[in-house]
Image (tube, helix red, strand yellow):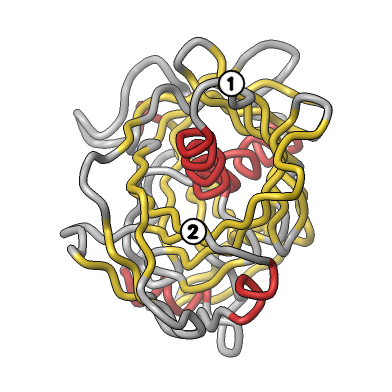
Amino acid sequence: MPHAVSFTKGHGTGNDFVIVEDPEGRLELSDDQVAVLCDRRFGIGADGILRVVRSASLPEGAATSDAEWFMDYRNADGSAAEMCGNGIRVFARYLEDAGLARFDHPVAIGTRAGTKTLTRSDLGYEVDLGGWAVETEETLVRARGLDIPRPGLGIDVGNPHVVVALQSEAELERLDLATRPMLHPDPPAGANIEFVVPADPLVRNGVGMIRMRVFERGVGETLSCGTGVVAAALAVRHWAGRGAPDHWSVQVPGGTLSVRMVEGRVLLSGPAALVFTGEITLA
């Protein structure tokens, strides 16, 4: 039977989400329903869905007990994702505006990549993503607009990424990301793919500066990807070697995000906005 679902639309630097409050965990959305909700012509339109559910309402083992709230993030095609750096800040903004959490102290939020801690920051909210891993094997990346395949560096920040360095901003602009770039070898679970151009000079006042575009797994090109921004900063820092800064400013088509590395942990900071609310009937 058709039923009505209340929702809120939000975004972080243009990476947009449909937020559905479901504290008791009663709403079951199929992949097709998620895809329809996220469709920009026939639905609300978004890069993904954030379901706001209490950890205690999830099946045993699905969430950790150290976070009251769990972010059930689904990509626009309905597939489940481990983590979303922009999404978790929008999730925090929703919790705060709805009176479900107070951010005058650090707040733990559960994700499929484990529990993440969020605090307020000058840019909006900052999320501690924990540690990261750099892959040892190189990935070859083919993309429309690139004359030859380029090497990519695998970075895992709770979800998988492949980062490719380009030579110029003109090369970044020429990229055609309407089609998913090809990876060799292709990771079994796929990966988000970031293309980055370092600024000249790379470091200004102790802060590394880069530009980025991204093809997001299960979505396509997006205006921003929070974990992708983090992966891009980590990759360029890795390539720059000893003496590279621990603070990075990353420009994406939807705005600017900040990345900090502190004692083996990486933190992402940026804005989060709620745009409108509504109700939609699901078949």
Label 2: which residue? 194
Check disc 2: other Cα within 10 Å, few if <14, some if 14-19, many if 20+: many
Check disc 1: other Cα within 10 Å, few if <14, some if 14-19, many if 20+: few
x, y percent for residue 108:
51, 20
Tell me the mark number nearer the camera, choosing from 2 and 1: 1
Provide the secondary structure element on which disc 1 rests.
loop
Can I make out residue 283 in this image? Answer: no
x, y percent for residue 11:
69, 55
Quick one: 210 or 12, which is closer to the camera?
210
251 displayed left or right of 222? right
**Residue type (three-letter) at the residue carrying disc 1:** Gly
Give the CA separation, mark 2 to mark 1: 23 Å
* Residue at figure coordinates x 73%, y 35% from the top left: 203
Label 1: which residue? 243
* Residue at figure coordinates x 20%, y 58% from the top left: 187
**Residues tagged 2 and 1 counted as in contact (Cβ below 8 A):** no
160 displayed left or right of 281? left
Quick one: 74 or 199, which is closer to the camera?
199
x, y percent for residue 148:
39, 78
Q: Residue furthest bottom?
A: 41
x, y percent for residue 36:
46, 79
> Where, quadrant-wise, is the N terminus in this rendering?
bottom left
Quick one: 164 or 132, which is closer to the camera?
164
Q: Quadrant of residue 43?
A: bottom right
Q: Is residue 143 above or below residue 223?
A: below
* Residue at figure coordinates x 65%, y 50% from the top left: 198
Q: Is residue 265 above or below residue 283?
A: above
**Residue type (three-letter) at the residue carrying disc 2:** Glu
